Amino acid sequence: MQTRDVEYKHGPDLLEGFLAFDDNKAGRRPGILLFPEWYGVAHHAKARAKMLAELGYVAFAADMYGKGVRPTEFDDCAREAAKYQRDRQLMRGRGRAGLRDGADLSGVVTFHANLNTPRPEDAKNIKGKVLVLHGADDPIVPEAEVLAFEKEMRDAKVDWQLMSYGSTVHSFTNWDLDSDHSRPAAYNMKSDARSWVAMRAFFDEIFT
Amino acid sequence: MQTRDVEYKHGPDLLEGFLAFDDNKAGRRPGILLFPEWYGVAHHAKARAKMLAELGYVAFAADMYGKGVRPTEFDDCAREAAKYQRDRQLMRGRGRAGLRDGADLSGVVTFHANLNTPRPEDAKNIKGKVLVLHGADDPIVPEAEVLAFEKEMRDAKVDWQLMSYGSTVHSFTNWDLDSDHSRPAAYNMKSDARSWVAMRAFFDEIFT
């Protein structure tokens, strides 16, 4: 397993992502671009990148915030994430910088992602397949947001799927959180395992 | 592969299901009780039972209607299905008769199932895990019905998951239908394949 921090730029801004791949595997293999939760490229994101590398992918955890910007406290995370939530062009630019070589996306998988957009009409530009893995009790991604997202996908004729996991709130894959489901965000071991299986099946489909 | 028609009774009513299993496989294996679409135990249901047997399960396609009652025309199907939609005690009794030995259910998978119930409070009796595979554009199972079902599951603290497949209407696994997605019911090869993969992953989970 090879891992390394990788510096790259978005305009004038220096970013630092995290690359992981299995150097015992020969040949070309699909690349996975991983966008972390609002903690940025911290240890949970890095651990997931390594898990993806173990599956045989080249995984790159992209940096949205800038090198060294790694908030840990709620308020700091919220403030940092809000910069990109508010400025979607900036968010998209940062995302595209992480893609680096301009490759087309075969698909997108989200784990407990926010699903809102100020520009639903842009969904017509989505060429890859979309798999949304969602906590059915996630108060941060409420039912109205899910329904609006479904409408957005439907109107744009995207190839989309959305899995709702019962008794599951935000951040359900993040084992750094406790499992108290009465909180807005909590780890859920069952939904974590199920969503990982669903991701793998989706990768098997899109990378054949 | 062994297949056979199996007569059994629900009270005074004679039913005829269809059993399939792979006799080249030794030892005990999980049983799958398959409830067909409104065509009853016809050739699509039988083909699915055989596909399940090939996966190593003992599959039994249950008869809801009674031996020889195998409607093929829309009006006949609708009339026959409505008997059980209207009388849920009768529906449940028929279902339980198909289970035959009273075994607990480890889980339930539905493919484009109706999700309504006159007695949502009964969901508290559900002990197995529930996986719902749903066409996001299914006019026969509209959004309000899906949301009511989710509330039912949530309130009863069932272990549930619901996958919505985009651009997919009712009967999406039924290859006897054409693929005209503008109709209320149509075959969808992609959603058929994806839902079968999801079912297999679910079985791997519940039967370990």
Image: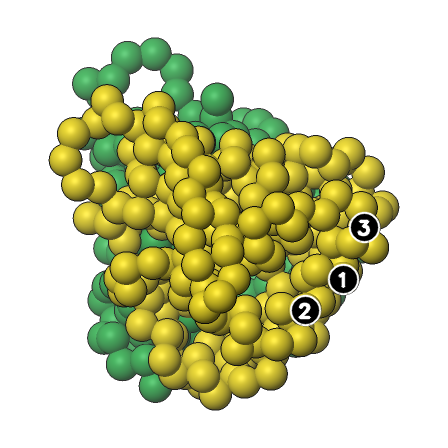
Chain colours: A green, B yellow
- Image location of residue B170, percent across then percent down: 70, 51
Question: Which residue is disc 1 drawn over?
Answer: B79
Choose between B207 and B161: the one closer to the eye.
B207
Secondary structure beneath dot 1 equals helix
Q: Earlier in the sequence, mark 3 or mark 1?
A: 3
- Provide residue A194's location: percent of width, then percent of height: 34, 53
CA–CA distance between discs 3 and 1?
9 Å
Q: Is residue B106 left or right of residue B93?
A: left
Q: Position of residue B103 (x, y in %)?
A: 26, 62
Quarter of the image with the N terminus of chain B is top left
Which amino acid does the dot numbered 3 rest on?
Phe
Give the amino acid at mark 1. Arg
Could you say whether the residue bearing mark 3 is in a helix, strand or loop? helix
Q: Which label is found at residue B83?
A: 2
* Residue found 52% across the figure and 36% down from its top: B46
Q: Look at discs 3 and 2 and give the one toward the viewer.
A: 2
Residue A48 shows up from this direction: no
Could one spot residue B118 in this view of the protein? Answer: yes
Q: Determine crowd level at label 3: few under 14, some 14-19, many 20+ residues with C-alpha closer than 10 A.
A: few
Residue occupying image coordinates x 49% and y 66%: B12
- From the viewer's perspective, is A173 left or right of B110? left
- Whole-percent x, y for residue B144 in the image: 69, 75
Read off the chain for label 3.
B
Number of numbered callouts drawn:
3
Pinpoint the chain carrying mark 2: B
Q: Residue at x 31, y 72 (%)?
A: B127
Residue at the farthest left position: B27
- Res A24 quadrant in image: top left
Residue under numbered circle 3 = B74
Q: Nearer the viewer, residue A203 or A51?
A: A203
